[in-house]
Structure formats: structure tokens, C-alpha cells
Amino acid sequence: MRSMEVQKKILLVLGLLFVVFIVPLVCFSLFYPKFRVQNFEDTVTLNYKNPYQMASGNVCYGTVFHCQEVSVSQEGSVDTDRLGEYKITYQYTYQDKVYTKEQTVMVVDKEPPTLVVNDEKLIYCPNGKMPTYSYTATDNYDGDLTDKVTVQLEKGQVLFSVEDSSGNRTFFRRDAMAIDESKPDISLNGDSVVYIPLNGTYEELGASASDFCDGDLTSQIKITGEVDVTQAGEYQLTYSVVDSSGNENSVARTVYVYRNNDYTAPSGKSIYLTFDDGPGPYTEKLLDILKKYNVKATFFVTNQGLTKNYDSIILRAYQEGHTIGLHSDSHSYSIYTNTKTYFDDLYAIQAKVKRITGSTSTIIRFPGGSSNTISKSYDGGSRIMSQLALAVEAKGFRYFDWNISSGDAGETTDTNQIVKNVVSKLGNGSTYMVLQHDIKSYSVDAVESIIQYGLVNGYVFRPITMDTPTVHHHINN
Ligand code: ZN
């Protein structure tokens, strides 16, 4: 019985509490007017580039039963093209009083980068070294991320991975094969064609080799072949290297051991190097080259001393055994006006050479060669070249044209081309007369290669003498 009374008392207290506290609270919340903000979130998360919509028209003042909309204005803006946190302040006014409410907008990037691997088959070195694979990575926010890609080898697979600036990560995994298919690179130190005088010294400069998988393989290079400097001839040296996977590569060097030029040797294939229009600034260099190979040549000189005194060079050439031929004193084509103008000019250069060398030269080359037609512009139709060809011989001169033009008079300024122009025309004939100009550096630079080629291929270089076989062009005027 007592317990029933206790229960009654408890219920009574609870009922009183309900009436005194809860009922007024509910009434108060339903009937007391206040601001009611609907659909408003304090924090909004927005994906990059998605439009932000302002919360609007959702504030009212009043009770649950009757609520009057109030006007709302907002301050601040959201740039959805830029990641970050933005604050928007909403203001609403009621009965001249301003109220504010703040919203935080987070613009975030949740899209991971796109990673594309272009290689269909991935390989790597047996020692684990990876080649450069082909791939691209692009991100909606960061753009090109290709150089941020990390590449790792993991249990026979290549793992590509890239992360954007918001920490979104993309992985790509592909099976790979351990195989080395690439040959080592091997390259010679020094020239691939080397010329050595008989009984000279051959210095082995070796080669260097590197391999993608194995790295430097220079010490593994094997050289086969030998050079016998006591025997003139052509020698072939082969440099080969094999990488740890058996890929092989080799390069070759040709060594020519040549006999020094002996211009007094009888008959055979003869080359007459001739240089017109000098002396000039490159003539001394040319003389040094000729000396090195004991080659004697012919200089058809002009009176360049008018502007610079080259007398000592003419003297040096003469003293070193070269032939000083006569080209022209003035090198003006007006010398072809008549025979007198021609011989006045010829005797002037002859006298000059005599004064320098003490010797009277009777070996000549016509400016433009005996085949020139430019003389037609000066001779008034007298066929001056036909006259001169006879006249010079009658006066005890011998004239020489050429049968190999180096092309240095306008056709080319390329030294290698000049060498090619000359050596390509050398055959098994007995007399090759080469036209070059020692006032052109690119032509002088070709001389050493021409000499080396000639010596290796059994030619003798000779200076023109009064006994040299005739080399004449067809006369066109
Ligand atoms: Zn000339």
C-alpha cells in the first residue's frame, strides 16, 4: 500500500513540473516572435568550378504560425575558380535594426589527376634500372603534372603515381619485363681516319663506351687489328664492346701509313698542285703544310705586293723548292686588249720575280686560263687568246692550264667539298694539274687532306718544270 502512495506522489510531482516548466516553454517557442532562418548552412563545401548559390529569401520574423519575410542582403563573394575558404555575411534588417549571420564556403578540389602511360610494353634493365617511360599527367586544377609523376619498380611491376596540390592521388600499375635490348654506345677518341708517315709513331687514342644498363664500359673495349708503321699501307682497327646482356657494338678506325712524297721519283701518277693569285695571308701556312709532307707545288703569282709586301714569301717558296710561275702583274682582264698590253704585264711580273728570286721564270698561267672568253670583252674581236697561245711559246714561255678545278673560285667555300672535288677526279692517269687559290683560307685548309689522300693512293706530288707534260684547255677566243 505504501508503495502505491509513493507512486502517486511521484506522478504528482512530475505533473506539476510539466505544467510549470514544459508547457510554458512550448508556448513560448511557438508564440514568441523571432527570426527564423530556413535552409541556411553555416558551412558549405563546394567543388572547384561548381557555381555558388547565395542563400536568399529565406529569413522571416514572427512566430511559427505567422512569419513575415524580411529583406536580406549579403556581403562577400566566392571565386569557385580558386580553391580556398570564403566568408559570406548575410544581413537582414527588421524595424531599423541590422542583424548579421556568417557563412563559410569551402571551395575544394576532390578530383585526382589523370595519368596516361603511353608505352604498351614496359621493360627495365635486369639490374633494376628503369628507362624513361612515356607518360603524361594532367589535373583539373593544377594542369600539367607530368614532371611530378614518380615511377617505381615493385615486384616486377612499374608503379606510376602522382598527387595534385589538394592531395588527390592517382596510381597506375603495369607489368614490366626485365630485359636489356639496347646496344652499348661506342665512340672513337680522335679521328676515324689517321695518317702516319712511314716509320712514324701511331698513338692509340682508344675509344669510350657506355651502356644504358651497365653504365661506363670503356674498360671493356677490345681492340683488334694492328698498325705496322714500318710498312706503308692501309690498316683497319676495330673497337668492340659487349654489355652484360650480350648486346654488342663496334666502331672502326682506318690508319694509313704513307711514304713521304718523293717528287724526283720517276714517272707514275703525278699531281701538280698549283696556286693562283697569291701570295696572300694564308701562303705561309700553306708552305708549312707542303714542307711537312715534302710536297713541291707551283705558285702562279701576282703583284699582290702593291698592297702588302709579300716578297719574302715568294722568296721562301722559291728557296723551299716550289716553282714560282707567272700569273699576272695586275690581274686585270684589260691585259687582253692586245699582245703588247699582255706582254707588258707579263714582263712586269717576270721582272719582279727575278728581282726577288734571282731566277727568270718562263712558266705561266693566263688569268682565266687559255680557255677564257672574258678576253672577248677587251680584244676588239682579235681572238687574243689564239694569238697569245702561239706568241708566248714563240718567246720561250710555256703555259699551263689545269685539268682538276677545286671549285674554290666561286663554286664552293666548303673545305670538305674542295677536297672531294679534287680527290674524286684523281684516277690512274699520269698528269693531274689541280687549280687552287692560296688567297682563300678554306682552299688552303683542304691541301693537307688532298696530300694525304694522294700519298696513300700512290701519287707523287711534283712542281711544274719546263719538262712537265702539257696541260692545255681548248681555246675559245
Ligand atoms: Zn687568277
Image (cartoon, helix red, strand yellow):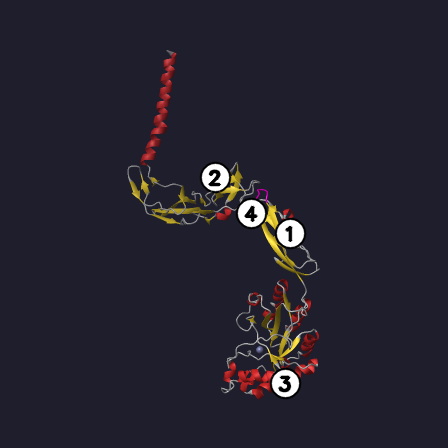
Outermost residue on the bottom side: it is: 340
Tell me: residue 99, above or below residue 282. Answer: above
Viewer-nearest residue: 155 or 191: 191
Q: Which mark is residue 183?
A: 4
Q: Which mark is residue 348?
A: 3
Q: Residue at x 35, y 29 (%)?
A: 22
- Of labels 3 and 1, earlier in sequence is 1
Mark 4 or 2, closer to the camera: 4
The disc labelled 3 sits on which kind of residue? Ala
From the image, which quarter does the N terminus lie in? top left
SS at mark 2?
Answer: strand
The disc labelled 2 sits on which kind of residue? Arg
SS at mark 3?
Answer: helix
Report the side of 8 relative to 324 (left or right). Answer: left
Q: CA distance from mark 4 to mark 3?
A: 67 Å
Total numbered badges shown on the rendered structure: 4
Name the dominant secondary structure of the magenta segment.
loop
SS at mark 1?
Answer: loop
Residue holding disc 2: 173
